[in-house]
Amino acid sequence: MVEHDCQQVDPSCPHDSSLDTITFAEYLRSRNASSVAISTATVWTRAMLGQEPEDISALFFLHYCKSGGGLLQMRSDREHGGQFLRIRQGTQLLAKGLAAALPTGTVQLSSAISSVERLGNQRIQVSGPNVSLTARKVICAVPPTVLPTITFVPALPASKLLIASSYSYGFYMKTMLVFRTPFWVSKGFCGLVQSFSGPISIIRDTSIPVDNKHVLTCFMAGIPGQEWSQLPSAARQDALLKQVGQVYGEPVKAYEEFEELLEYNWKADSDSGYGCPSPSLPPGVLDSAVDAMRNPFGDVHFVGTETAEQWKGYMEGAIRSGERGAEEVRAGLEHVVAKM
């Protein structure tokens, strides 16, 4: 049902007030979803957004699914699915590769921006505590939750501020459990787990056998994840190993083969907007401000995975949005040259 309904949503202009006035939980109940179906759908929203179905617009979730080709494709491990490929060297390889292709000194790190001021036609002052630049065009790639922390002169349109301030992150934390051996493989398991109970919503085998790395990546999300995060460090680790041991039927080996735990808490990361993987919208916003995040404001152009029409919330969406923003800037600069 969700797959069918998300396919009816326009990826570029998702207007549907009947879906945007209710939460995803209300949408499920209105279609007589069983308790097991609602539990399954709760795993989707937690795993994909760190949110509970009660907290997000039905239209937003269906649109989010449509941007990735549909719910089934987004959740799929098969070719073209959202979980099909990983990067052996880590996803930061993409950013490092792009930076290395630019002239030395082009990328300025630790240079936070606090204001963007229009001084004239194609003349913008970009300023922060450690940086001051004048540019003809500006591409803003910060998450919507960070946008309100930057002062724009003149002020951004009300519709853009509304949607930016309405976005919020759920709870989402990724932890990698490193083991000496892939004990789950010897039992014939692929490693993938979708759980209705316990702090871990999703487990994926992210091992790299050729590098002798045996890793289960655990995603703690939504209410269970948030409750787990309040535990002391030792208790958090114990809860994860206990659940891993239970689901694979190896309560002893999970502890014996365990080597180390690696984790990152996006809730403490101001640059990401204090969350991951993508912020969500409550009812009543998307239908009325659908294009607001993507539309340029004078010579300021807005990109980021949240603005993508395809694969919103994913790195694919981020790259596609960057190409769109670059094309907007190129076309704008060429137009000025042509007029001259």
Image: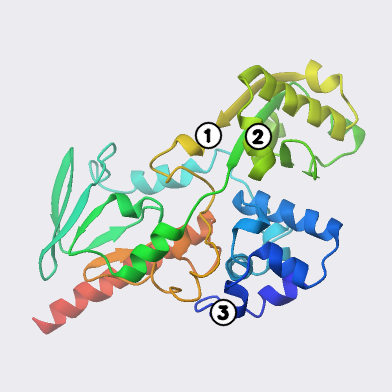
Judging from the image, what secondary structure is the residue with disc 1 in? Answer: loop
Q: CA distance from mark 1 to mark 2?
A: 14 Å
Q: Position of residue 62 (x, y in %)?
A: 63, 69
| Residue bearing the label numbered 1 | 265
* Horizontal side of residue 291 vs 125, given as left or right: right
Judging from the image, what secondary structure is the residue with disc 2 in? Answer: helix
The residue carrying pointer 2 sits among few (fewer than 14), some (14 to 19) or many (20 or more) residues within 10 Å by Cα, namely: few
Q: CA distance from mark 1 to mark 3?
A: 35 Å
Q: CA distance from mark 2 to mark 3?
A: 34 Å
Q: Position of residue 298 (x, y in %)?
A: 22, 71
| Residue bearing the label numbered 2 | 227
What's the residue type where badge 1 is placed?
Answer: Asn
Judging from the image, what secondary structure is the residue with disc 3 in? Answer: helix
Which of disc 3 and disc 1 is earlier in sequence? 3
Q: Are marks 1 and 3 in contact (CB under 8 Å)?
A: no
Which quadrant is home to the N terminus? Answer: bottom right
**Residue positioned 20% across, 51% down in the render:** 115
Q: Quadrant of residue 36?
A: bottom right
Q: Residue 17, which numbered label?
A: 3
* Horizontal side of residue 154 vs 256, given as left or right: left
Q: Residue furthest bottom?
A: 339
Task: Check the image and report above or below for 232 versus 283.
Answer: above
Which of disc 2 and disc 1 is earlier in sequence? 2
